[in-house]
Amino acid sequence: MAKDFNNPMVVDGYDDHIRKLIPGYELIHLQVNAILKTYLPEQANLLIVGCGTGYELQYLAEQFPQWTFTAIDPAISMLEKAKSHIEDLGLEKKINFIHGDTSILQAMNLQFDAALSILVSHFVPFEFKAQYFQDIGKSLKSNAFCLSYDLMKIENEQQLLTLKHLAQATGLSEKQSQMMADRLTQDFYLASTKQLEGFYKNAGFKSMQSFAQVLNYYGFMGFKA
């Protein structure tokens, strides 16, 4: 059974746990920030797919006060926590919160300068991955881009063991890292980098490049035709 992101215990412990689970979590966002600052104009409209508890939104809204954001998440508990967090900071005027997955994007009839899918698509079942990226692609302006960062397919036991060792070094206990390994097939749907490239291409992205890698975690940037 996949992780329940509507479970209050999962939601409340998410921000602390993810920093231990994901190597270089803050560095991911620093890289995303640098890319956005390089490629986007002073006025931009961003799509945040899977906004979680709002950490990413807060960081971006504070860094780019002139931008507007649309944040979607299929887990209502996550979305409500993010919205409450953003409201507490007084940043809600520039952010539109929408409950739902990427299938709602077409009905919204909005076009974005960029989309962020950070630590999201590895939770999307294989039968829906192609549509997931197609939904994102259709919501982007011409020459806009999508940034994704996900855990990719683990090819052998050595890669899995290395991932466990790194997770322990970043804060997980040995028991927690073993639980992570045991739940990979339940919580994640891990594509290979070649498969992900195919999803981007079939979704109308003309080119794709890597911007980050930590073991089996990869960051990719796809430019829409």
Image (cartoon, helix red, strand yellow):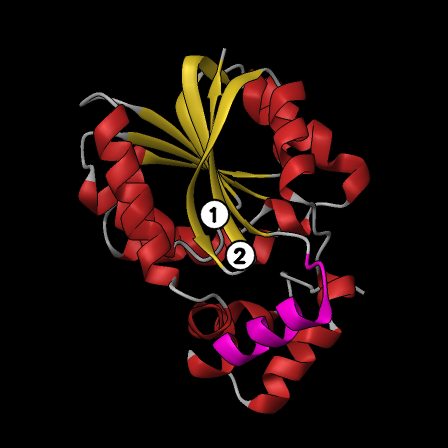
Q: Pointer 1: residues within 10 angstroms few (<14), some, or many (20+)?
A: many
The answer to whether residue 120 is seen in the rendering is: yes
What residue would you read off at disc 1? 51
Going from N to C along the chain, the mark reached first, 2 or 1, is 1
Q: Which mark is residue 127?
A: none
Q: Position of residue 131 (x, y in %)?
A: 71, 28
Q: Position of residue 29 (x, y in %)?
A: 33, 51
- 113 relative to 164 in the view: left or right: left
Q: Nearer the viewer, residue 30 or 140?
A: 30
Q: Which region of the structure is painted magenta?
A: 154-166
Quarter containing the N terminus:
bottom right
Q: Position of residue 2 (x, y in %)?
A: 75, 62
- 222 relative to 54 in the view: left or right: right
Q: Residue at x 42, y 70 (%)?
A: 19
Q: Residue at x 57, y 74 (%)?
A: 162
Q: Position of residue 92 (x, y in %)?
A: 31, 42
Q: Pointer 2: residues within 10 angstroms few (<14), some, or many (20+)?
A: many
Q: Residue at x 29, y 36 (%)?
A: 35
Q: Which mark is residue 78?
A: 2
**Disc 2 to disc 1, C-alpha distance:** 8 Å
CB of mark 2 within 8 Å of CB of mark 1? yes
Name the kind of residue labelled 2 in the image: Met
Tag nearer the camera, 2 or 1: 1
Seen in the picture, residue 211 relative to 46 is either above or below; the reply is below
Give the overall secondary structure of the magenta segment.
helix
- 69 relative to 125 in the view: left or right: left
* Secondary structure under the numbered disc 2 in the rendered image: helix
Is residue 152 in the magenta section?
A: no
- 73 relative to 32 in the view: left or right: right
